Image (spheres, helix red, strand yellow):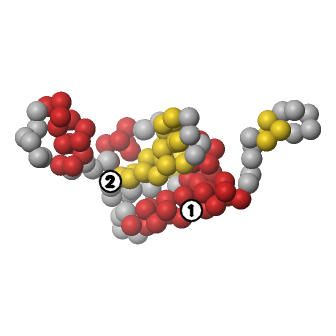
């Protein structure tokens, strides 16, 4: 944030921010294209707060594959999703959550340790 003449904080629109928005939007668009179904490249996105200096963009493709990108703040994340033309949700809608495909890797990482998965799985 930068200070205005009145002392109020104004959002910074520096070159670094603009580069990150463009890079994220390009990556998000590629993800949507790779996970299209019957030519439908529409994907959904949810922006989640991670910590002081990072925000996670969770992407769910039309085919149910998912991925993520990390931005410096929620404003950059939102701008990138909008620039990529994806549907941005405030939280995971049921239909999007039901579409997410998970595999053995996710089950081992998310629940395997708590459920006593075999060593090395």
User: Residue 113: which quarter of the image?
Assistant: top left
Q: Residue, x 9% and y 42% (percent of image)?
A: 119
Q: Residue placed farthest to the top in the image?
A: 114
State the quadrant of the N terminus. top right
Considering the numbered disc 1 on the image, is that residue within a helix, a strand or a loop?
helix
Q: Is residue 49 visible?
A: yes
Q: Is residue 73 left or right of residue 99?
A: right
User: Residue 16: which quarter of the image?
Assistant: bottom right
Separation of disc 2 and disc 1 at Cα?
23 Å
Count of numbered circles in the view: 2
Q: Residues within 10 Å of mark 1 (few under 14, many from 20)?
A: few
Residue 91 in the image: above or below residue 43: above
Percent across and percent down for residue 105 are 21, 49
Q: Which one is nearer the viewer's eye here, 30 or 110?
A: 110
Residue 75 in the image: above or below residue 115: below
User: Residue 17: which quarter of the image?
Assistant: bottom right
Residue 75 in the image: above or below residue 17: above
Q: Residue placed farthest to the right in the image?
A: 5
Q: Residue, x 87% and y 32% (percent of image)?
A: 7
Residue 31 numbered mark, or none:
none
Q: Which residue is mark 1?
A: 23
Q: Which residue is mark 2?
A: 64
Percent across and percent down for residue 72 are 58, 46
Q: Which one is nearer the viewer's eye here, 75 or 46?
A: 75
């Amino acid at each position: 944030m930068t200070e205005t003449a009145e002392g109020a904080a104004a959002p910074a629109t520096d070159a670094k921010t603009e580069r990150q928005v463009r890079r994220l939007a390009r990556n998000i668009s590629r993800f949507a294209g790779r996970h299209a179904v019957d030519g439908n490249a529409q994907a959904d996105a949810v922006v989640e707060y991670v910590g002081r200096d990072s925000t996670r963009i969770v992407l769910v493709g039309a085919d149910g594959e998912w991925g993520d990108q990390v931005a410096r703040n929620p404003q950059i994340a939102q701008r990138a999703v909008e620039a990529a033309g994806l549907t941005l949700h405030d939280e995971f809608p049921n239909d999007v959550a039901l579409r997410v495909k998970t595999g053995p890797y996710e089950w081992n990482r998310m629940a395997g340790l708590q459920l006593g998965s075999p060593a090395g799985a």
